[in-house]
Amino acid sequence: MDAALFGAGRIGKIHAGNLARQPGVALRYVVDVDAGAAAALARQHGARVATADEVFADKDVGVVVIGSSTDTHADLIVRAAAAGKAIFCEKPVDLAVDRARRCAEAVRQAGVTCLIGFQRRYDPTFNAVKERIVKGEIGEPEMLVVTSRDPGAPPVEYLKRSGGIFRDMLIHDFDIFRWILDDDAATVYATGSVLTDPAVGSVGDIDCTAVTIRTRRGRLCQINTTRRAAYGYDQRFEVIGSLGMLQANNHRPTEVVASTATAVSADLPEHFFLERYRAAYAAEMAHFFEALAKGAPVRTSIADGVAALELADAATTSWREQRIVTV
């Protein structure tokens, strides 16, 4: 099967490498506004640089992988669906809920597979927690507490077009909430502050948040985030149930613990998402092609992408208007 990749940046390189590992799959085209980056990545994987028009006109291309900037996602999804090509697209579908819903409808009408890149669902540790919940190890889940902290904020130029922290950063946490509790939000209350860098506030964004979600079944979820954790990439959650608790903790470069007369110490968490979710990105791509081969549904569909964006919108409204929002 021939595939085309949109985006030759940081995430595009990850996806290109994982594509190359799929049996029977060849990366044929790389598309990027940066011609140099596209050419370098294409050379690395035996592909060639192309335009979007060339990709969608080529009937031999069965799959498009979209790792380009967020503002391109919706158009590429709609064009790929119209061309009958399976779609793997990074989150979010779009920054506007209405447009994301139109993309979902285009995918539905075309009858093509569309996976949205919520890679955390494919992380071995997080997935093990989910499997043990399903098996009933902690009984009925009642509360989820998510800690999600970046080691540092992205450049202000990026934040200007990111859609805000709830759409850019917490959208992953909203997806984790829906997946782990297998429930939908009834109400959302979000608050936030600018605590790490005044420049973040200058573009109308915040860098620290606290979100409380009450589900339709009365369960509770709390999500705390910050753009600056001096000790590394902090990604943890715990699920409290009627029979106990399951925790998913950080990954570290090694699990060596040093004990001396003065301290007990361990490695800091892995530095950022490329390291922390290396295995998840690989598993996500393998799952996508396995689903295509079997004609099976994907684990993170475009409907999941729309639902997470709806929560991000509700949280944004809650923060701005300082009120509980009914979903």
Image: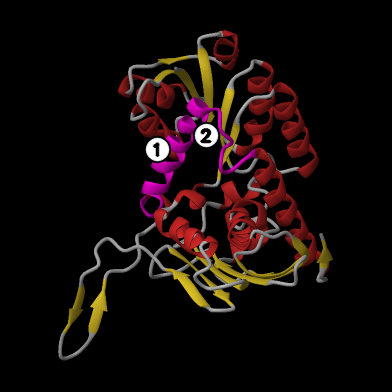
Q: Quadrant of residue 234?
A: bottom left
For the point 49% across and 66% down, which residue is it? Answer: 228
Residue 288 painted magenta? yes
**Amino acid carrying mark 2 in the image:** Gly
**Amino acid carrying mark 1 in the image:** Ile
Query: Quick check: marks 2 and 1 in contact, CB under 8 Å?
Result: yes
Numbered disc 2: secondary structure: loop
Relative to 151, is 162 above or below? Answer: above
Going by the image, does 113 lie left or right of 234?
Answer: right
Secondary structure, magenta segment, majority class = helix
Label 2 packing within 10 angstroms: few (<14), some (14-19), many (20+): many
Q: Which residue is mark 1?
A: 14
Q: Which residue is mark 2?
A: 67
Going by the image, does 92 lie left or right of 99?
Answer: left
Farthest-out residue, front: 135
Q: Quadrant of residue 86?
A: top right
> Where residue 117 sits: x, y (%)?
54, 42
